[in-house]
């Protein structure tokens, strides 16, 4: 994925609860707007457009440069505790994970993943046909403190099929989530929850596991910490507690089957839903509902009318 599109959509990184969204660290953006002008925008120069781009996404112009602040990360303790989802109850893993996550400091960011891998040759042999339920962890404190924090989770979950949680150089941080390193087309959707509806999320995971039509990657992210800090940009839902997303690789049958699955699955958690997350809602045509709270949406519509009144820049939806 591109660094600019990731950041304009918010940018939820592996240390997000400690450092906030990637968008919160941007110092300036160079952007070519619909009138053909190259503008450098920042908190001091055209601050309204600057704030709208960060979280508002990509339909106000083409960003040609981005200056961002760095954060100090001296060490990293992290990895994944992975379980065979046919041997453990994924709902029990979810419960143990969420109970534990509520006890850890903001310097620890974590998520739960549930993936029923199809038995296809493009996957590594150890994943083919496996149902993997894992807790992914990233922590910037010492390894000893990390061990102490993770111990209750290890105890609650019992022996893992694979436990890669360790001290590592940051250059190995991509191994925590093991996202695929080859490009693929996906349909993705998401729901931001005020508080976790445990029964609903457990059902969403069950429906998306083995036996579902198509492959679905479910991820449950704990939010909070620095993500809840107000920032002068348009990344919404700062006080939400959890993000649940489903990512469905597309095959030749297109988006319809994935969309139908998502509609049913997200129905299970609609009671606590406050909205959807821009970065994790893609390939879905013109669905814009829920991407912003009413005030942010109004702010973005004013910017769109001012900077791109003819709607030159469209994603697969428009804010107008
Ligand atoms: C496997 C996977 C893992 C992911 N993990 C994360 C994650 O951990 N955290 C997270 O926050 N997101 C994550 N995402 C979501 C990802 O950040 C967003 O979907 C992002 O928009 C993808 O960017 P892209 O460049 O790949 O897509 P594209 O479709 O190329 O771009 C997305 C949008 O940005 C626009 N755009 C691209 N470049 C520019 C530019 N220079 N100026 C203006 N507009 C531009 C495009 O026109 C398009 O509308 C993940 C997605 C996938 C598929």
Image (tube, rainbow, N blue to C red):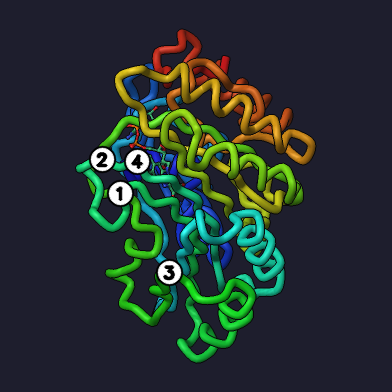
In the picture provided, is 182 more to the left or to the right than 33?
Answer: left
Residue for badge 2? 120
- Residue lying farthest to the top in this orientation: 310
Instruction: Examine the rendered structure and indicate whether residue 217 appears above or below residue 92.
Output: above
SS under mark 4: loop
Q: CA distance from mark 3 to mark 4?
A: 19 Å
Q: CA distance from mark 3 to mark 1?
A: 15 Å
- Residue lying farthest to the bottom in this orientation: 144
For image coordinates 60% across by 57% down, the residue present is 89
N-terminal-most mark, 3 or 1: 1
Residue for badge 4? 118
SS under mark 2: loop
SS under mark 3: loop
N-terminal-most mark, 3 or 2: 2
Tags 4 and 1 in contact by the CB under 8 Å rule? yes
Inspect this view and state whether residue 44 appears: no
Residue for badge 1? 128
């Amino acid at each position: 994925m591109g660094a600019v599109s990731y950041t304009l959509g918010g940018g939820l990184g592996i240390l997000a609860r400690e450092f906030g969204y990637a968008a919160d660290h941007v110092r300036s953006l160079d952007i070519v707007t619909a009138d053909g002008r190259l503008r450098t925008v920042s908190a001091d120069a055209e601050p309204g457009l600057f704030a709208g781009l960060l979280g508002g996404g990509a339909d106000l112009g083409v960003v040609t440069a981005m200056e961002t602040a760095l954060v100090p990360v001296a060490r990293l303790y992290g990895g994944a505790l992975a379980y065979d989802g046919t041997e453990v109850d994924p709902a029990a893993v979810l419960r143990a994970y969420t109970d534990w996550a509520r006890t850890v400091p903001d310097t620890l960011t974590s998520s739960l993943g549930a993936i029923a891998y199809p038995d296809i040759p493009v996957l590594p042999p150890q994943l083919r046909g496996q149902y993997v339920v894992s807790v992914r962890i990233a922590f910037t404190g010492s390894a000893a403190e990390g061990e102490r924090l993770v111990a209750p989770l290890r105890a609650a979950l019992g022996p893992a099929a694979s436990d890669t949680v360790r001290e590592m150089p940051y250059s190995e941080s991509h191994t925590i989530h093991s996202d695929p390193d080859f490009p693929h087309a996906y349909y993705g959707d998401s729901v931001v929850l005020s508080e976790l509806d445990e029964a609903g999320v457990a059902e969403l995971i069950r429906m998306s596991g083995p036996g579902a039509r198509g492959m679905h990657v479910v991820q449950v992210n704990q939010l909070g910490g620095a993500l809840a800090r107000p920032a002068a940009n348009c990344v919404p839902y700062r006080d939400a507690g959890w993000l649940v997303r489903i990512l469905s690789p597309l095959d030749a049958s297109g988006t319809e089957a994935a969309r139908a699955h998502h509609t049913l699955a997200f129905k299970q958690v609609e009671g606590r839903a406050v909205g959807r997350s821009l970065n994790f809602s893609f390939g879905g045509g013109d669905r814009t509902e829920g991407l912003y709270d009413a005030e942010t949406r109004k702010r973005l519509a004013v910017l769109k009318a001012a900077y791109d009144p003819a709607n030159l820049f469209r994603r697969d939806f428009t804010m107008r």
